[in-house]
Amino acid sequence: MPMNTTSTSFSSFGISCHRENSFRNSFLGKNDEVIKCSMGERTIHFSVRKFSGNILDTVNRQNTKDINGWIKDERIVYPSRVINQEIDNYCFQKNAKISTEERQRVFSLVRQRYQLTLDVKAAQSSINHVIMGNASFGKKIDTLCDSMSRGCKNRTADCIANLLADKFYQKHIEPDIDIVKLRNEIPDYLRCAIQA
């Protein structure tokens, strides 16, 4: 069962986000957003600030381009991945298929609305790849999803990774694009593309 990354979605799974406003962190200018995920009695937390730092450190170590070149690539790849992912989620939920032309129309509509450069073939973002490959992320997912089926664990991990990646994109790649709003609008763009 696909999950909506902006709210709880199945059974006892829940996600909430809040700002950590300790006096010490406020004084140091390090207010942090914390993502809290729970499944039944198990709860894990992710510091968005720390995770963003880990992503940037990993990219700096592994990337053959400078960080600005990587950011330029992710400005195209990440929203394209989001669009493709949400089209696939929609089709899965509705047990439907769309043509290549309809997919391209969705991209065209989003490109016009958001003034983005997009690539309809983009399906993988290095942001998500870094998150999913992070040892701390894996351990926390293992703790949260103990004794769950592989499919449920994978959906949970994808949901949390997408939330962290969206927050990273919003803060470090393209602050002027509300990526969560874009995610939520894809079904509307898809319906328009199919009717065209």
Image (tube, rainbow, N blue to C red):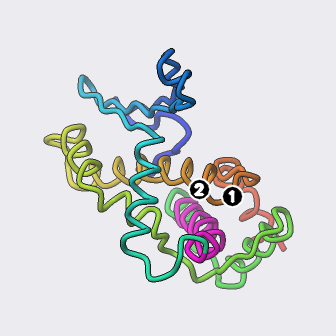
Judge whether residue 85 is colored magenta. yes
Total labels: the figure holds: 2
Residue drawn at (77%, 77%) of the image: 105
Residue drawn at (16%, 40%) of the image: 146
SS type, badge 1 = loop
Q: Tell whether 106 sits left or right of 112.
A: left
Residue drawn at (73%, 54%) of the image: 177
Give the amino acid at mark 1. Answer: Glu
Judge whether residue 79 is colored magenta. yes
Residue drawn at (46%, 46%) of the image: 3
Residue 176 image offset from top left, x and y in percent = 76, 53
Give the amino acid at mark 2. Answer: Tyr
According to the picture, the residue beneath numbered tag 2 turns out to be 169
According to the picture, the residue beneath numbered tag 1 turns out to be 174
Residue 28 image offset from top left, x and y in percent = 53, 27
- Which residues lie in the magenta part? 69-90
Q: Looking at the picture, does residue 194 appear above or below residue 100?
A: above
Mark found first going from the N terminus, 2 or 1: 2
Q: Do the residues under discs 2 and 1 have CB atoms within 8 angstroms? A: yes
Q: Looking at the picture, does residue 166 appear above or below residue 47?
A: below
SS type, badge 2 = helix
Furthest residue in direction front, as rendered:
28
Q: Nearer the viewer, residue 124 or 73?
A: 73
